[in-house]
Image (spheres, rainbow, N blue to C red):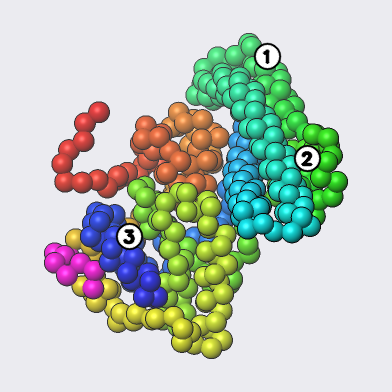
Amino acid sequence: MTAELRDWLAELAVSEPATAAEVSAALVAVLRSAELAGLALVDQPGRRREPVKDDPREVADYVYQLRLEQLQLLRQQVAQATNARRAAELALSAQQSAGAEPAVLATLAERLAAARLHEDALAQLSQRLRVEVNTFRTASDTAKASYTAAEASLRIAEAIEAAGGQPDPDLAQRLEDLRSAEERLLALRWPGTRTVVIRHPTHQTGVGRPAGADRPEPPPPAPPRNPEPVAGLLELRADPLGSDIRVLFGKEPADTVTLLAVLEGPEAVSQHGAQAITLAGDLLTEIRDEGWPTDIAEVVLADPDEFVAQFFPADDGSILRRADALAATTSFGRLRAERHMTVDEVAVRSGVPRHRVEAIERDGLRAAHVHEAVALARALGARLELPAGEGPVAG
């Protein structure tokens, strides 16, 4: 591992010992595993959560998430434009105080005017996009609620009939209600689909243009920007139910687990995940081609016992036992496949809506409410364990 990653884990062991112990147990499970594909916590890095193709609610959520990402990016551009405008103001003020030549002052004044126009255009676009995001969310939530109610009514009728009950005389109407609700949900369209063109102040001309000229329009949802990870680069979800810590690693060289980067927390995952995947992939490629880089400090630990001793010298074996438990865990999707059950069968048996079953299989327990996780575990004949502290939890 890199010395920087070692220092991060050492600091975590002091500031958040329970989290550090869970992360270390997950890492030990990786170190001990002969076949990483068998570990439920290991996955391909940056796997984007695509919508379930036949569920319009998931598609609506996907579009909404893309818009939130776009709004966040736009807010960052507004902040950058504000900083540029302030810098232009300071530069003009400084030259005025220094008695600069009129030509110099005129140039700086023109740059300041352009920066103000740029900042204003971005601010207006950000405000308009924020309103549209909120409007879309309200309409989407209403349409999704109607679809969920229609689906639940239909599924209950189908389950009763499948269990040997009387056929529902209103089954055709329930099907029609579901179809209508789906059409209303899919009919949602995002306002404004023209391409946005926002010019940098240094590229603008005609500083005296009237307000609103060339005003940018909200762009359509952007496509996923996740990079294609380097072959062999893996992601360990080291604390999926807690801080959502991701460790990027590779099995390079042979029989060696090399820890390359860490992302701590959902915000870091969403904002810096793509960059971390790229940097970790570059480092892994360099290690393969040329060995460990000379400009990066390397920390080598011989085995899991030495790893635990490095960060938890007083551990009584609990981390190794936790690693064994993590190695034996599985996912709902894998468990359902082993039981030869369909998503619909699990949904009926558990009482959890089909689209929620699919979402939990795709995104893991972090996407589940406790009652949903318990219901799914019971339906699949599994035991559910939620690790916590020493004391009991009520409520």
**Is 192 rendered above or below residue 301?**
above
User: Which residue is rendered at x = 69% and y = 34% of the image?
Assistant: 124
Query: Residue 61 in the image: x percent, y percent?
Result: 60, 36
User: Which residue is rendered at x = 63% and y = 58% of the image?
Assistant: 98
The answer to whether one can see residue 321 in this image is no
Q: Label 3 belongs to which residue?
A: 23
Query: Residue 133 in the image: x percent, y percent?
Result: 64, 31
* Badge 2 or badge 3: first in the primary sequence: 3
* Badge 1 or badge 3: first in the primary sequence: 3
Q: Hey, what amino acid is under mark 3? A: Val
Q: Is mark 1 on a helix, strand or loop?
A: helix
- Picture quadrant of residue 323: bottom left
User: Which residue is rendered at x = 67% and y = 57% of the image?
Assistant: 99
Quarter of the figure with the C terminus: top left
Q: Label 2 belongs to which residue?
A: 216
User: Which residue is rendered at x = 43% and y = 38% of the image?
Assistant: 368
Specify the label residue 173 is tagged with.
1
